[in-house]
Image: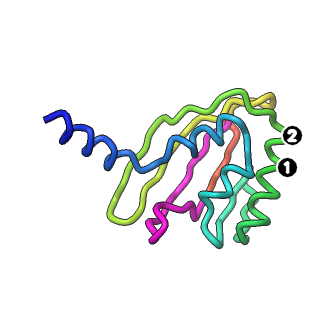
Amino acid sequence: MMILLAIFAVSAQEVPAEFVAAFKKGSAQELSRYLGDTVELIIQKRTMNTDKRTAEANLTAFFNQNKVSNFTVNHQGKRNDSSFIVGTLTTSGGNYRVNCFFKRTSNGYLMHQIRIDKNE
């Protein structure tokens, strides 16, 4: 019975703990491991459809301007071959709502959209 519960818990968890840890550190380099080849990146209403390298550079710039002190996952969900998280990023520049959308690939789940908006 415990084995069955453990298997269910692992399969229900779609967002890797390392992904959450990367946000908690404000590490764009670690987050880039979870980026798809193309990413829609929205930071403070500035939208760009970009490649993985440019997305990482923009996230690095954001984290350099907003030193991260914490990240908490408020909600996560899964439907078919996609999943998402909604979290709160606590930084020196204030709190931000973070939405990340993932698609299932042969390598697991990769982000195809990241949205970071300042909480008012």
Viewport quadrant of the N terminus: top left
Q: Secondary structure at mark 1?
A: helix
Q: Is residue 118 above or below residue 103?
A: above
Residue 46: image quadrant is bottom right
Q: At which x and y percent is residue 73?
A: 51, 36
Q: Is residue 15 left or right of residue 52?
A: left
Region of the chain picked out in magenta, as a range: 96-113
- Amino acid type for the residue under numbered disc 1: Ala
Residue 38 in the magenta stretch? The answer is no
Q: Secondary structure at mark 2?
A: helix
Residue 13: image quadrant is top left
Instruction: Name the dominant secondary structure of the magenta segment.
Output: strand
- Amino acid type for the residue under numbered disc 2: Gln
118 or 49: which is nearer to us? 49
Residue appearing at x 55%, y 38% in the figure:
87
Q: Evaluate if marks 2 and 1 touch, with contact meaning CB atoms under 8 Å apart.
A: yes
Residue appearing at x 59%, y 57% in the figure:
34
Residue appearing at x 72%, y 71% in the figure:
51
Residue 98 in the magenta stretch? The answer is yes
* Residue assigned mark 1: 61
* Residue assigned mark 2: 65
Q: At which x and y percent is residue 64?
A: 86, 41
Q: Residues within 10 Å of mark 1 (few under 14, many from 20)?
A: few
